Image (cartoon, rainbow, N blue to C red):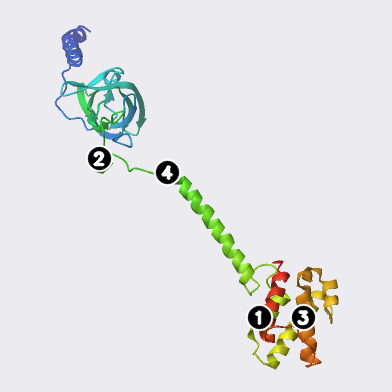
Amino acid sequence: MTRHLRLIALLLPLWLMHGYAHAAAEDTGQVSSKELPVDITAINPEREVGYHVGDVLTRTLILKVADKYELLPTSIPIPGNQKRYRNKEQGIEIYASDLKHEHSGDQNIYTLRLSYQVFTSSIVAKPAALPPEFVKFTGEGQLYRVRLPSWNFRISPLAVYGSVRIEKDMSQFRGPLLLDDKRQQLTLRIALVVLGLSLLGLLYILGNRSWLPRMGGPFAKAMRIVRKTPQDAAGVQLAVSSLHQAFNQHAGHSVFTAEEVLAKLPQFGVMQAEIQQFFQLSRAVFFDAKAPSSLNEPAHVWLRKFSRRCRDVERGLK
């Protein structure tokens, strides 16, 4: 027992001296010269230009270190502390700081979120920087100082000083000059819609095919036949027969006089005189070649015009 007491009495002064030396090193800022292996990942703001007085910049630093080392919370930057560059105030101070710690595997992971506020301005854009920060780690009875990287950016003026010519102000830090073209785009869309409707109307009026409703009626087909008939007696007979067939299809039965057509198809009332001329021409072509005709132009020319008029009435283009 006496032997153990003597051993404790010898070791106790050594232990006290070691603890005092460690505390003195931490208090006086004596740091180990050994480099601490810390994996540092910096997540900086997305842009580097265009900051004005009052803006807040936030960056996140992720520090990964072996679990035998611990970060001293008292070493993280203190809010309200102004930053200096070459011993000159930059007009930037720490706005807020937040430290989170987690343990993963054999590592300590520290997430340090630092916010800086700009409270200075200038008549021209000037460079600035979030200077390097220093934090301290303890482990293995030693104190380590770790440097966090800096980040450069630019502070822009609130207003342009003096007159500026855009063609001479081609700074790479200035974004492109954008013009509002919403009104022009609206005008272009309206013009395209009007053009589309106009083309559709022309297609409906001039088209001979059945692309749209009411385009493939009997008179549209008869008109195509009339346009292809030869300019002789046989061609006139074929044209008249095609138009007779169109009238019969519209009426649902055979019609032989203009009165029957107008009674059954009142929409053709706008062509009353022309329909009467058509039946007179039909009588002269098929039954009585000497019958008088009121046409003042060749029969094949008149039939083409007449078939077109019938097709337009058929489509509702009165």
Toward the viewer: 128 or 97? 128
Amino acid type at image mark 4: Asp
**Quadrant of the rendered structure where residue 36 is?**
top left
CB under 8 Å between discs 4 and 2: no
Residue marked by disc 2: 169
Residue 277: give its label: 3
Residue under the image location 28 percent in, 41 percent down: 166
Q: Nearer the viewer, mark 3 or mark 1?
A: 3
Query: Label 1's element?
Result: helix
Query: Label 3's element?
Result: helix
**Quadrant of the rendered structure where residue 29 is?**
top left
Figure quadrant of the N terminus: top left
Q: CA distance from mark 1 to mark 4?
A: 52 Å
Q: CA distance from mark 1 to mark 2?
A: 68 Å
**Neighbours of disc 4 within 10 Å: few (<14), some (14-19), many (20+):** few
Residue marked by disc 4: 180
- The image shows residue 215 at horizontal and vertical percentages of 68, 71
Q: Earlier in the sequence, mark 4 or mark 2?
A: 2
Residue marked by disc 1: 224
Instruction: Judge whether 47 appears above or below 194 on screen.
Output: above
**Neighbours of disc 1 within 10 Å: few (<14), some (14-19), many (20+):** some
